[in-house]
């Protein structure tokens, strides 16, 4: 996937598979994000996206689901 980067996003407040699915769906809806996969045990989401995807857009998507964006690696 040329022009696609992988980012690890820390998400707090997830407690179950339903929570993880909500975060995955929200992140997948961000323009430029190609895929999102949540690891509930580690409280992270791994996204594959275009480099132009802004951290603010990722934060907004997570915050709108009721969870807390805790930063990017």
Image (cartoon, grey):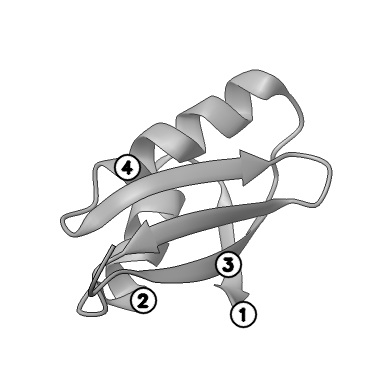
Q: Residue at x 20, y 79 (%)?
A: 52
Disc 4/disc 1 C-alpha distance (Å): 18 Å
N-term-proximal mark, 1 vs 2: 2
Q: Which residue is mark 3?
A: 8
Q: Secondary structure at mark 3?
A: strand
Q: Residue at x 57, y 64 (%)?
A: 9
Q: Residue at x 49, y 39 (%)?
A: 23
Along the line of sight, the residue nearer the viewer: 44 or 62: 44
In this image, 9 relative to 39: left or right? left
Give the label, 1 or 2, closer to the camera.
1
Q: Which residue is mark 4?
A: 28
Checking the image for residue 55, the label placed there is 2
For residue 53, which quarter of the picture? bottom left
Q: Check the image and report above or below for 35 versus 55.
A: above
Checking the image for residue 11, the label placed there is none
For residue 10, which quarter of the picture? bottom right
Disc 2/disc 4 C-alpha distance (Å): 14 Å
Q: Residue at x 69, y 39 (%)?
A: 14
Neighbourhood count class around disc 4 (C-alpha, 10 Å): few under 14, some 14–19, many 20 upward: many
Disc 2/disc 3 C-alpha distance (Å): 11 Å
N-term-proximal mark, 3 vs 1: 3
- The location of residue 51, given as percent across then percent down, is 26, 79
Disc 3/disc 1 C-alpha distance (Å): 5 Å
- The location of residue 17, given as percent across then percent down, is 68, 22
Checking the image for residue 73, the label placed there is 1
N-term-proximal mark, 2 vs 3: 3
- The location of residue 24, given as percent across then percent down, is 46, 37
């Amino acid at each position: 996937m040329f022009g696609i980067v992988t980012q690890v996003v820390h998400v707090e407040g997830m407690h179950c598979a339903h929570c993880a699915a909500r975060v995955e769906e929200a992140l997948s809806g961000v323009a430029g994000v190609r895929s999102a996969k949540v690891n509930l045990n580690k409280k992270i989401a791994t996204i594959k996206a275009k480099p132009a995807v802004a951290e603010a857009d990722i934060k907004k998507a997570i915050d709108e689901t009721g969870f807390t964006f805790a930063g990017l690696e």
